């Protein structure tokens, strides 16, 4: 494997970690209604399990309300059950052909817990990055042992991997900081 392909593979894996973190952060409540709170809730319908965003239109008509309009009204109660089972801690109310979820403002204690959870998610993502870095460095050392990479190429590869991890750690810090600010904002 060449130096470029090792670095490219490392970057792709780390990009996936960032994308996963952003999805997880989207699901954290901020005291404002957000479609991200519910869009990935798994709903049982038609003998299968689907994310809510695939079976319903989700909107936020105002800052405290999430409206869910299923494409098929026969699954309205399934959506309600799935929301109640989820860990978002919000109560859905069926209103005609839609489900309304009112998002209450967060109290100070809950805000602090959510911001701590956001930081934990960021730390978990950083641990995953370090694991990917470790694998890439091991691969570079193996390639050098097998005479595929020169000693200089191995050093350049390790330096590049270090730059990539610093870049991705910065993205994690930015994402967590932004989410923490959203959570703590009253």
Image (cartoon, rainbow, N blue to C red):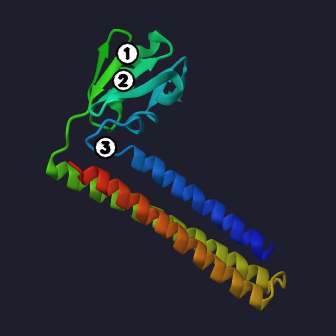
State yes or no: discs 3 and 1 in contact (Cβ < 8 Å): no
Q: Quadrant of residue 87?
A: top left
**Disc 2: which residue:** 67
Q: Residues within 10 Å of mark 3 (few under 14, many from 20)?
A: many
State yes or no: discs 2 and 1 in contact (Cβ < 8 Å): yes
Q: Residues within 10 Å of mark 2 (few under 14, many from 20)?
A: many
Instruction: Identify the residue at horizontal 54%, vertical 17% (top origin).
Output: 46
- Rendered image: mark on residue 29: 3
Residue 68 lies, with reference to residue 109, above or below; the image says: above
Locate residue 6, reporting x and y percent: 72, 71
Locate residue 92, reporting x and y percent: 29, 24
Which tag, 2 or 1, sits closer to the chain's start? 2
State yes or no: discs 3 and 2 in contact (Cβ < 8 Å): no
Q: Which SS class for mark 2?
A: strand
Q: Mark 2 to mark 1: distance in Å?
A: 7 Å
Locate residue 130, reporting x and y percent: 53, 72
Asked if residue 105 lies left or right of residue 96, the reply is left
Q: Tag count in the figure?
A: 3
Asked if residue 44 lies left or right of residue 94, the reply is right
Instruction: Identify the residue at horizontal 34%, vertical 30% (top origin).
Output: 85
Which tag, 3 or 2, sits closer to the chain's start? 3
């Amino acid at each position: 494997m060449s130096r470029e392909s090792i670095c490219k593979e490392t970057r792709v894996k780390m990009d996936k970690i960032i994308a996963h973190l952003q999805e997880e952060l989207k699901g954290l409540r901020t005291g404002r209604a957000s479609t991200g709170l519910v869009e990935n809730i798994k709903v049982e319908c038609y003998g299968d399990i689907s994310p809510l965003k695939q079976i319903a239109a989700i909107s936020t008509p105002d800052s405290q309300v999430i409206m869910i309009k299923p494409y098929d009204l026969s699954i309205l109660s399934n959506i309600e059950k799935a929301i109640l089972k989820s860990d978002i801690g919000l109560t859905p109310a069926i209103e005609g052909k839609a489900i309304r979820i009112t998002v209450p403002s967060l109290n100070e204690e809950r805000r602090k817990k959510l911001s701590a959870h956001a930081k934990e998610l960021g730390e978990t993502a950083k641990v995953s990055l370090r694991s990917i870095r470790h694998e890439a460095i091991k691969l570079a050392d193996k390639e050098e042992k097998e005479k595929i990479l020169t000693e200089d190429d191995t050093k350049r590869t390790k330096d590049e991997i270090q730059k990539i991890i610093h870049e991705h750690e910065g993205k994690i810090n930015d994402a967590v900081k932004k989410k923490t600010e959203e959570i703590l904002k009253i």
